[in-house]
Amino acid sequence: MDAIGESVENVGLAQEIQKGLAKSLQRPPKFAEWQADIDAKKAELSAMEGWDCYSKHRMVKNCVIAWAKAGNVDLSLARRRSSAGQAGDGDKPPTEGGVKANWDDFKASSAMDICCKYIVAADKVYAEPVSPKQFEEMRALGKGAFGAVFLTFKKDTGAPFAVKKCVKTIAKENKMIKDVLIEREVLSKMRSPFCVCLNYAFQDKDVIYLVLTLCPGGDLGFLLQKQWSDAKKKEDRVFKPFPDGAVKFYAASMALGLQAITTPATSTVTSSRRTCCSTPKASCASLTWDLPLTFPRARSSSAQAPAATGRLRRSTRRSTPSSRTGGLLA
């Protein structure tokens, strides 16, 4: 019965994620109010050299590639568009000459306007302080020693996350404040598709919120349970092993996850069949580990490792959402 309940729970979770956030709860971008910023961004990008703009801005790169694919433009050749009646080769990577030759055409297209709109929207999202009002909590996913995990959608982007809510009073009563600080510090350093990463971190009067990567595919134990046949009697059930390719994929994913975990800080990893989960992109995430109380010493005098105790410093980086994590339990 436990396996059936878990199957139903995971099916419901998958359906809820696919359904997404209701339109009435979403916060669409205010492009009309941002028109001055959009025009300024377009002028800024238009003044740049084509290859410099393409290589420095990921949004520009994605828009240029999508525009070229839709318009049959071969960016691998240093010429303007493909020859008449000749299809471009979309499998070849863009080259500097190809981007430069077609840069003026891209700037004059509607794709440039769309690109500038969403670059400005991303800047607005980064600039806004993170708070619980930006997220819509949908359902509980699980519970831990001093909190619970909830399926949550970000209102401005509609992206699903797993939000871990750590109750401060419980953490203090169980003398686990240091554990919360270390968990936040280690997760903020994760930059791997094979690990659960910290996207945002913020707090209010009573709760600490850790916005984590969502893994709706279930853990490895759940996937193994699904390999058993549906015979009524337990002794009649037959286990169907994973294909060799799947075993190699999960093993390699867990190895890369463990490597990413041990890179930023010394960790004692708990190895079990429940340390592996499936993310929406079908990769594995190593989830559970016992965190240490100290970080390794820096290799050089110029770079010092963060202390495991005391208040966490507010990060000033803007490269990723996970860098916008203020000090917790201040």
Image (cartoon, rainbow, N blue to C red):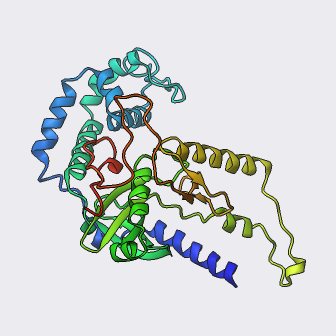
Does the image show residue 52? yes
Image quadrant occupied by the C terminus: bottom left
The residue located at (24%, 72%) in the rendering is 205
58 and 94: which is toward the camera: 58
Q: Is residue 109 shown left or right of residue 177? A: left
Up/down of 43 relative to 145, above or below: above
Q: Position of residue 103 (x, y in %)?
A: 30, 23
**Count of numbered labels shown in the rendering:** 0
78 and 37: which is toward the camera: 37
The residue located at (46%, 54%) in the rendering is 293
Does the image show residue 160? no
Image quadrant occupied by the N terminus: bottom right
Query: Which residue of the protein is positioned furthest toward the right in this rendering?
Result: 236
Q: Is residue 177 shown left or right of residue 263? A: left
Q: Position of residue 92 (x, y in %)?
A: 53, 25
Q: Position of residue 246 (x, y in %)?
A: 73, 51
121 and 175: which is toward the camera: 175
126 and 312: which is toward the camera: 312
Q: Position of residue 109 (x, y in %)?
A: 27, 34
Up/down of 303 relative to 193, above or below: above
Q: Is residue 55 shown left or right of residue 47? A: right
Dividing the picture into quadrants, the one containing residue 242 is bottom right
The residue located at (84%, 80%) in the rendering is 231
The residue located at (36%, 18%) in the rendering is 80
